[in-house]
Amino acid sequence: MNFIGAIFKAFGSVASLYALICTIRVFITWAPSINYSAFGKVLSQICDPYLNWFRKFKWTTLGRIDFSPILSIGVLVLTSTVFTQIGVTGRFSVGLILAVIIRMVWSVLSSILGFFNILVAIRLIFELLNKGTSPFLAAIDQILAPIQYKLVKLFNKNTYVKPTISLAITLACGIITQLVGGIIFTSITNLLMKLPF
């Protein structure tokens, strides 16, 4: 099993290295001088076919924000973790694989929720300070408005709600969802890890 374990660890290392390279690729797209350099072009050839495959899914975009890089890198990290776990433990169990997948799914969802909560908190702070509008705040409002509207409708169907109250409700729901989700997903993964098959 040592030879097979070493092969699984090697696959895990390759997936982890590729995830790191893809992460670098995503970050350099924010720096045009590096992105269009020779280094950027090499990374583009290595990473873009994989990263672009995830952009096909419409549900990875929320407003103007594209979450497909998080998903694509998450899949690589998941693959690396699964291969490494199999290589280290020397066993292949459905429970282990499911636990790793669920942990990774929660990690991605938690990151998105955390980002969402940060946006809501920023917008709430600007609202409390009575700062006017700006293109930045308008972009945040465009992202938050659909979700904010639905959440406020759950609690208050017929009357007008001030923007500060609406943002506070949205932030509270986001934080509670992240905390409760973390507890639920941790419990599920712990149960799955104990399964004998």
Image (cartoon, grey):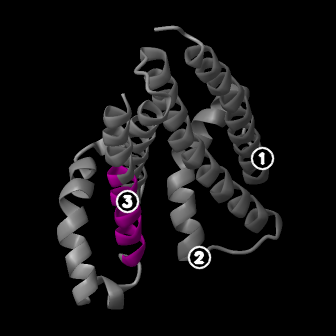
Q: Give residue 115's position: percent from left, percent from top.
A: 60, 54
- Whole-number angstrom distance, CA of label 3 to CA of label 2: 40 Å
- Local SS, label 3: helix
Tag 2: Cα neighbours inside 10 Å, few (<14), some, or many (≥20)?
few
Decide whether residue 21 is among the magenta residues: yes
Decide whether residue 5 is among the magenta residues: no
- The residue sitting at 66% across, 29% down in the picture is 181
- Local SS, label 1: helix
| Mark closest to the chain's N terminus, 3 or 1 | 3
Tag 1: Cα neighbours inside 10 Å, few (<14), some, or many (≥20)?
some
- The residue sitting at 27% across, 48% down in the picture is 54
Residue at the far right in the pictured view: 129
Residues rendered magenta in the picture: 14-28
| Mark closest to the chain's N terminus, 2 or 1 | 2
Q: Is residue 66 above or below residue 177?
A: below
Give the amino acid at mark 3.
Answer: Leu
Nearer the camera: disc 2 or disc 1:
1
Q: Give residue 36's position: percent from left, percent from top.
A: 25, 86
